[in-house]
Amino acid sequence: MSGNGKIIWRCRGREVVCGQRTLIMGILNATPDSFSDGGKFLALEKAVVRGLQMVEEGADIIDIGGESTRPGATPVQALEEIARTVPVIKKLREKTDALISIDTRKAEVARAAVAAGADIINDISALSDSGMAAVAAESGAGLVLMHMLGTPETMQNDPRYDDVVFDVRNFLEERTAFAVSRGIAPEQIALDPGIGFGKTDEHNLALLNGIPALAASGCPVLIGASRKGFIGRLTGKNPDDRLAGSLAVAGFSILHGAHILRVHDVKESCDAARLMDRLRAQEKRK
């Protein structure tokens, strides 16, 4: 971390400034079964058009995934995941300088994605694949470590914690230490508490309130709550109608210290983030 609360996140030689302006990570699911937009962007050209549209709308990062990680999702083989994502990464890399992230648990997929031009590895399993740390260390890619209880197939089977904020923070601290021990620079790492990944609604709310405890690590904190199930349960809305709830959570997250928001609705989230950034800056000056 440098002065004035600014954090430098290193992503393949690029120095990404966190802490002065909230970064927006746009979600691009090249999958047939993601909970919100499964099947919409499975075709290559549609995916590329959507990625470029998100950049125009203000996205700093495009997060490309080829395997749904919704509760109960069926795993996808690495070669299929590569076939879904790498052509999209290559095309986007030709057309934009925006940061590109690969959302994967598999080292084989991450290696192919980085070779195609991805800058960031977004690993929801926090290096559970024994080869993932080497990919991040060798490439210098930014690395998002996320907390998940179990796997997408099992994570919502009665999740329990002694103290969810304490437990998640400790897990992420342990995985950060493991990553560093494998040659990954601390400046490459960002942390994600895993909203909706093995948590009840109360756990999710507690983690949002606990963002300051995670931010104390000195790593950028990423929050991915967009259109999540807990928003639907609290508002009674279907995934396509959860924008208002998602923006409320986004604003709350920014005021509590989140640096990066992973979102479906880029344009609206950028507008909300700019306003919240100004409010937070004014509060800091008091």
Image: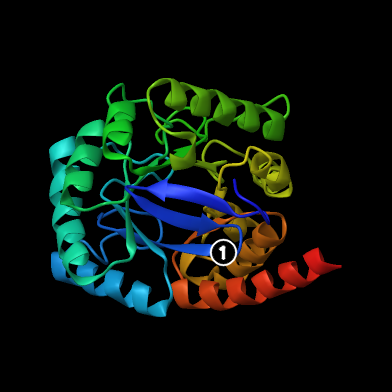
Say which quarter of the image contains residue 163.
top right
Pinpoint residue 62: horizontal percent, then vertical percent. 35, 61
Residue 75: image location, x then y, percent? 28, 36
Q: Quadrant of residue 30?
A: bottom left
Q: Quick check: 244 left or right of 95?
A: right
How far across and down, in percent of the image, does residue 176 sit?
51, 29
The answer to whether 184 is drawn above or below residue 97 in the figure is above
Task: State the residue position of label 1.
Answer: 22
Left or right position of 87 against 171: left
Residue 58 can be seen in this image: yes
Outermost residue to the right? 286
Quarter of the rendering occupied by the N terminus: top right
- Depicted 209 relative to depicted 286: above or below: above
The picture places residue 225, in percent across and down from the top left corner, at: 55, 55
Residue drawn at point x = 17 percent, y = 42 percent:
112
- Identify residue type, mark 1: Thr
Q: Considering only vertical position in the picture, is 269 above or below 141?
A: below
Q: Nearer the viewer, residue 10 or 220?
A: 10
The residue closer to the viewer here, 200 or 125, is 125
Disc 1 element: loop
Q: Closest to the observer: 94 or 17?
A: 17
Q: Nearer the viewer, residue 86 or 219?
A: 219
**Furthest-front residue in this view:** 3
At horizontal 27% and vertical 33% (from top left) the residue drawn is 138
Residue 211 shown left or right of residue 137 in the figure: right
Q: Quadrant of the C terminus?
A: bottom right
Residue at position x 31%, y 41% from top?
Answer: 104
Q: Residue at x 51, y 40 (%)?
A: 197
Quadrant assignment, res 125: top left
